[in-house]
Image (tube, rainbow, N blue to C red):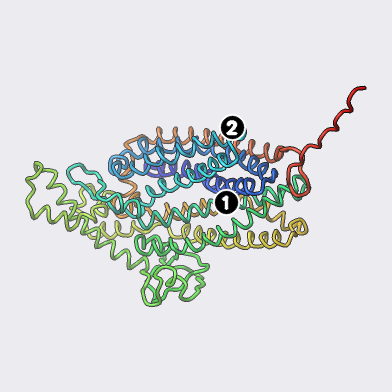
Amino acid sequence: MELDIVALSRLQFAMTAMYHFLFVPLTIGLSVLIAIMETVYVMTDRVIWRQMTKFWGLLFGINFALGVATGITMEFQFGMNWSYFSHYVGDVFGAPLAIEGLMAFFLEATFVGLFFFGWDKLSKRQHLMTTWLVAIGSNFSALWILIANGWMQNPVGAAFNPETMRMEIVSFYEVLFNEVAQAKFVHTVSAGYVTASIFVLGVSALYLLQGRHVALAKRSMAVAASFGLASALSVVVLGDESGYAATQHQRMKLAAMEGMWRTEPAPAGFTIVGFPDQEARETHYAIHVPYVLGLISTRSLTREVPGIEELVVESERRVRSGILAYTALNEIRSNPPGETHPAVAAQFEENGRNLGYAYLLKRYIDDPAEATPEQIEKAAWDTVPRVFPLFWSFRIMVGLGFFFILLTGVFFYLSSTQQLDKRRWLLWVAVWSIPLPWVAAELGWFVAEYGRQPWVIEGMLPTAYAVSSLGIGQVLFTIAGFALFYTVLAVVEVALMVKYIRKGPQPEGPLDAEGMQRRPTASPVPAPAE
């Protein structure tokens, strides 16, 4: 990848977005886990559950605060590095982001304060309601962000206005209930639940290995293992839904993820391993499992999954259609409003949905209308993302997903049979597994976003056309600034987490063997003075 302004802008956004997402899944998952723990406290009145809620809530608060800091800086880039993108989709993209800030973030931020400072000010049930509102706010925040991102993957409910050169909402209902956005939301939130569960499981396993805070650790592991197992199973099921959505709306991404260069007879097999070769247009040493891909992506045994070469042929047709739209658009904009010839308007109406494909030719020629057949063919092949990194990122992510099912399933059994402290090597496996959910989450986002290239808005706006008119030196300077800022935040995050994990939970008073707070013994009544 050449280090031009587009590549550098992509690098900066990838760096800030992927760093920000280190905080998001733990915030989403821990918010629900601490709400569950406090619910048990209110139902049983066992003070150890209040102690657990406060301890894991403290780690949640550290992560939440630093996540907010990284999220704010990330949003500045839309206007700074992607000004044409902001102009082009501001009417659509701004709506869910505004709702996220006004509704979800304020809900979450307001009740986070009450969660930490309201223990002695609110009744138990009022505080429990506060905790659940924090969890709901965290999940709602993810919903609106993923609605915006899902629209970029599948731009429904909006139409291009040739007079303003902007996308405009025609159906907010379609934007809100976009199939891709809804699939991404439930899949991402479930992945956050898995991340928090593995985190709680690993830290609790460390306490058991050290012989510290045993009662808290065992109860925390019981909650994390059961919640994590359900979440890990749901991630696999919801990942299947995402695969089906990709078949409907992002077929090139799916074909690249599978390294499938040519259409196979239905139902297509799933490639477990292989070595995609982009130049030879082959996947070497591929091992297939029959029928699986066809069942996942089409939910049938008779529908084909198109391969990359067939999809490139379709892209070439869409490039030619886009040229017609581009020609009509230029004529529309050269005439006063309302004076466009009906035939020209009809030509744009018929081909306008492929306008973005004409912009792919800008890489080779200034005027797409003058493109040669060879340039059109090159533009069509530009719709193919890099296959090798997508292919292996997806497989590592899926492999980790099945590992999480196994890990949480084992600890669910050990917790149910009260054998948590009898398999020390398994406790070490849990400790060393703490970073793995983040690896899986980052790979998932890599597949989702890198697999969409060359589009910033699928099929409509090429990434290269969305950047700001900046100098390379300016972008390099901001990359260095963000790298320094995020490195400092990373050090602060790790230092604070390690400090409070080492310190452990704060005692809530003397507890009996069942985790109930001991009642103070009544002092003897003094004998009356003689």
Tell me, for residue 309, which label it has, or none: none
- On the rendered image, what quadrant is the C terminus found in? top right
Q: Which mark is residue 121?
A: 2
Q: Amino acid at mark 1?
A: Thr
The local crowd at label 1, few if under 14, some if 14 to 19, many if 20 or more residues have their Cα within 10 Å, is: many
Residue appearing at x 37%, y 65% in the figure: 308
Q: Which secondary structure, mark 2?
A: loop
- Between 454 and 530, the one lying in front of the other is 530
Residue 404: image location, x then y, percent? 60, 59
What count of labels does the image hold? 2
Where does the image place residue 145, in percent across and percent down from the top left?
Answer: 41, 46
> In the rendered view, would you say 272 is above or below 220?
below
Circle nearer the N terminus (2, 1): 2
Horizontal and vertical percent position of residue 65: 54, 36
Q: Is residue 264 left or right of residue 238?
A: left
- Cα–Cα span, label 2 and label 1: 32 Å
**Residue with the mark numbered 1:** 195
Question: Which amino acid type is marked by label 2?
Answer: Lys
Q: Quadrant of residue 90?
A: top left
Residue drawn at (74%, 37%) of the image: 509
